[in-house]
Image (spheres, helix red, strand yellow):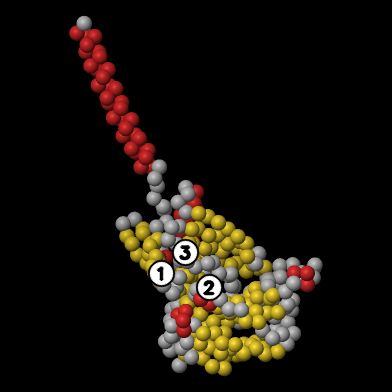
Amino acid sequence: MKLHIRHKILLVLLICLFTVSALCGCVSASAASDPVPKLQLAVTLGSGQVLTPEDLGNNYDGNITYVGLKTVDIQLGDKNLPLADAIKNGEITVEGLIAWARIDARYDLCTETFESKNGLAQFYYTYPEFQLGLIYDVYETPDGESHLIKQFSVRALNQDPSTPAFPKADGTGFLDDEDWGLTFEVPEATSTSVKVKCTQKDGQQVGTLHVQDYILYSTTEEGKIYFDKEKTAQDIPLNMDGTTDFSIDWKDAFGELPKGDYAIRLTLEDVYDPADIHPLIRKYHDQQFYEVKFSVK
């Protein structure tokens, strides 16, 4: 009889131990089911900037663009430091950032989307406070040359992705230019506006060319950029086979610029009836970019 009671007590103790063990396992499983993103960036809003390979210690052979962001910091273990410094010091690579973002997307810690513009694949990774943008693709120009396009951006969520531009290595234009027969001059520039004279002659446009928006950036102040699609939207039709004078004013959008050298990247669009496109035309770019340089004295 006493032996039977001892067996019952032993059985109760075993059940209690099993229950405690199971509860601990549940807690551990619960903690494991709530993972932390591998990519941890802290951002502050601002006017943005462009980081060149030189700014990154040549540890990335493309530009990194902050759009609508003043600072971008990264958490690496117990250390927090500017993303540019981490890349420059070799503590992280852009390829590593994208790998982490893809792992996070796999576990629903960010959202991966993609699209194709001008024949190039673009991937976006959206987190609660920022979005990564990546282009890594080959662009074939009409002369038969192939160009590896590498662009990486960190963007504020209130900034829409801009249509990418692919500048030529010699700075004379863009790889995907259609010949629209355009030349630009700046007769007058102030700290709040520029007057632009555009001449159009001949060219291979289909309809009427329109200025749609612009990006303003410094060519001397560490690539500082001023970009906000809502504030820079335009609709300026250009005279075909003629001259058009127009002004770009950014006083309300960005205030006054300090003295220095600047450039405006104008977005132009060919507005036409789709029926006017010849059936043999492939990959016609009805939107492209022109850079207009000026100085504020």
Q: Residue at coordinates 31% horizontally, 57% vertically from top-left?
A: 78
Mark 2 falls on what kind of element?
A: helix
Q: Residue at coordinates 46% horizontally, 81% vertically from top-left?
A: 252
Most distant residue in the top direction: 1
Instruction: Bin the neighbour count of mark 2 within 10 Å (Cα to Cα): few under 14, some 14-19, many 20 and up.
Output: some
Identify which amino acid the numbered label 3 is placed on. Answer: Leu
Query: Is 46 or 60 nearer to us in this picture?
Result: 46
Q: Which residue is mark 2?
A: 229
Identify which amino acid the numbered label 1 is placed on. Answer: Leu
Q: Are marks 3 and 2 in contact (CB under 8 Å)?
A: no
Give x and y (percent) for residue 207. 73, 77
Q: Residue at coordinates 37% horizontally, 40% vertically from top-left?
A: 30
Quadrant location, the C terminus: bottom left
Mark 1 falls on what kind of element?
A: strand
Is 28 positioned to the left or the right of 160 in the image? left
Is 284 positioned to the left or the right of 23 in the image? right
The answer to whether residue 1 is above or below residue 110 is: above
Query: Is 97 or 11 nearer to us in this picture?
Result: 11
Q: Are marks 1 and 2 in contact (CB under 8 Å)?
A: no
The answer to whether residue 24 is above or below residue 185 is: above
Q: Which residue is mark 1?
A: 45
Q: Earlier in the sequence, mark 1 or mark 2?
A: 1
Query: Is 263 or 46 nearer to us in this picture?
Result: 46
Q: Which residue is mark 3?
A: 157
